[in-house]
Image (cartoon, rainbow, N blue to C red):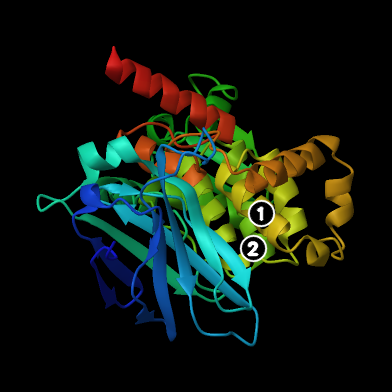
């Protein structure tokens, strides 16, 4: 039986594979032609039809794996994602050194769904793979940018005027604000302002959980939605903690993505796992666990690994993640990563903060409401 016809096009970091007459393919698996991207040659291996001996949980799924052909002398980190029509699948990161290294999904899509929903008008299945190489190039989810409101910026610039009705005392510095703005943009700070003062006096609210510079970053964001320049790991962690305490969710999510994008590596993974757990940072936690499982020996030599060992709950989560990674059966359906949950929830204007379990429950509730 002739091999299926597959067209491959490289578009920088994106490779497009078009599998023609997908529904008519009867062979169990095949490999596409190679196409060059990022200095390497890539192909996909597709399993469009499973045989009768396939695992009962997997036999109804189309699998997809991405391969590179050239031998790589040094450790290569490959970050990738896959798209099919409007859907984008989990972004993953793998370290590899040998040619022929394949990574992907044994349960990419249900075959019935492919035939009913994802084929093009000409019957072809089009898959786009985004590929990035290098430790510093990560495909990281960021919250959508908020729209700046010029009137709030003007109020903030004039916060020392008579219009302000709340004063925050951080060390020796004071920061003035407007309670009605805080009510709309940062309710925790509004609630704190209501706990101090009376109707006849402007409340002075002591802030003891962070430094003045960090608090000013929070207040800057509340009024101007300007994301701060974060240069160090320490400043990122400090700002994340402050944003979480005052429930400035959008800023917290932004800093969380910065931590994943700029500061997560084998040296910081252990400490960032503990921080992600304490602040319910689902994306940061998912990525640190992924890195831990990919290079556990290196992470265990870092000074903060003992903090992970002190938590039986975190060790249990690592064990469960390792077991799930090694399973060949599917245990969750799309979406099943933090990035995917957040993309769906963000598109529906729903809250994207919280742990993985919280995001899962929120998505299920949304899905059930749409079906009812």
Image quarter of the N terminus: bottom left
Q: Is residue 80 left or right of residue 93?
A: left
Image-quadrant location for residue 41: bottom left
Q: Position of residue 109 (x, y in %)?
A: 38, 43
Q: Position of residue 293 (x, y in %)?
A: 71, 55
Task: Kindly identify the residue that appears in the image at 27 percent across and 75 percent down.
Answer: 11
Of residues 237 and 320, the one nearer the viewer is 320
Q: Position of residue 63 (x, y in %)?
A: 43, 50
Q: Is residue 43 left or right of residue 239?
A: left
Of residues 41 and 57, the one nearer the viewer is 57
Which labelled disc corresponds to residue 353? none
311 up-or-down from 31: above or below = above
Task: Kindly identify the residue that appears in the image at 64 percent across and 63 percent down.
Answer: 264
Task: Kindly identify the residue that appears in the image at 79 percent across and 37 percent down.
Answer: 316
Q: Are marks 2 and 1 in contact (CB under 8 Å)?
A: yes
195 up-or-down from 186: above or below = above
Which labelled disc corresponds to residue 288? 1
Task: Kindly identify the residue that appears in the image at 57 percent across and 29 percent down.
Answer: 357
Secondary structure beneath dot 2 equals: loop
- Chain-order first, disc 2 or disc 1: 2
The span from disc 2 to disc 1 (Cα, nearest Å) is: 7 Å
Q: Position of residue 31 (x, y in %)?
A: 39, 67
Q: Is residue 108 left or right of residue 276?
A: left
Of residues 324 and 372, the one nearer the viewer is 324
Which residue bears the numbered disc 2?
264
């Amino acid at each position: 039986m002739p091999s299926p016809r597959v067209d491959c096009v490289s578009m920088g970091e994106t490779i497009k594979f078009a599998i023609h007459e997908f529904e008519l393919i009867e062979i169990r698996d095949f490999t596409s032609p190679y196409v060059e991207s990022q200095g390497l040659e890539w192909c996909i291996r597709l399993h469009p039809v499973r045989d009768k001996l396939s695992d009962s949980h997997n036999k109804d799924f189309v699998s997809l794996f991405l391969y590179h052909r050239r031998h790589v002398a040094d450790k290569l980190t490959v970050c990738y994602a896959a798209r099919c029509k409007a859907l984008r699948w989990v972004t993953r990161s793998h370290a590899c050194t040998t040619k022929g290294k394949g990574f992907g999904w044994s349960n990419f899509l249900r075959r019935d769904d492919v035939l009913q929903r994802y084929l093009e008008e000409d019957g072809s299945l089009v898959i786009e793979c985004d590929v990035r190489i290098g430790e510093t190039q990560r495909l990281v989810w960021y919250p959508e940018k908020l729209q700046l409101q010029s009137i709030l910026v003007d109020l903030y610039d004039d916060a020392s005027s008579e219009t302000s009705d709340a004063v925050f005392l951080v060390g020796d510095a004071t920061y003035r604000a407007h309670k009605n703005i805080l009510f709309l943009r940062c309710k925790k700070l509004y609630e704190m302002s209501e706990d101090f003062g009376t109707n006849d006096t402007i409340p002075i609210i002591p802030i003891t959980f962070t430094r003045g510079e960090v608090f000013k970053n929070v207040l800057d964001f509340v009024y101007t939605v300007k994301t701060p320049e974060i240069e160090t790991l320490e400043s990122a962690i400090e700002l994340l903690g402050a944003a979480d305490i005052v429930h400035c969710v959008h800023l917290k999510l932004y800093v969380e993505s910065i931590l994943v994008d700029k500061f997560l590596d084998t040296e910081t993974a252990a400490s960032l796992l503990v921080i992600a757990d304490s602040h319910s940072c689902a994306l940061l936690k998912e990525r640190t666990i992924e890195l831990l499982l990919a290079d556990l020996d290196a992470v265990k030599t870092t000074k903060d690994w003992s903090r992970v060992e002190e938590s039986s709950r975190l060790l249990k989560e690592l064990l469960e993640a390792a077991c799930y990674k090694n399973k060949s059966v599917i245990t969750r359906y799309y979406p099943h990563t933090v990035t995917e949950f957040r993309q769906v929830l963000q598109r529906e204007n729903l809250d994207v903060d919280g742990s993985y379990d919280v995001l899962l429950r929120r998505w299920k509730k949304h899905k059930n409401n749409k079906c009812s």
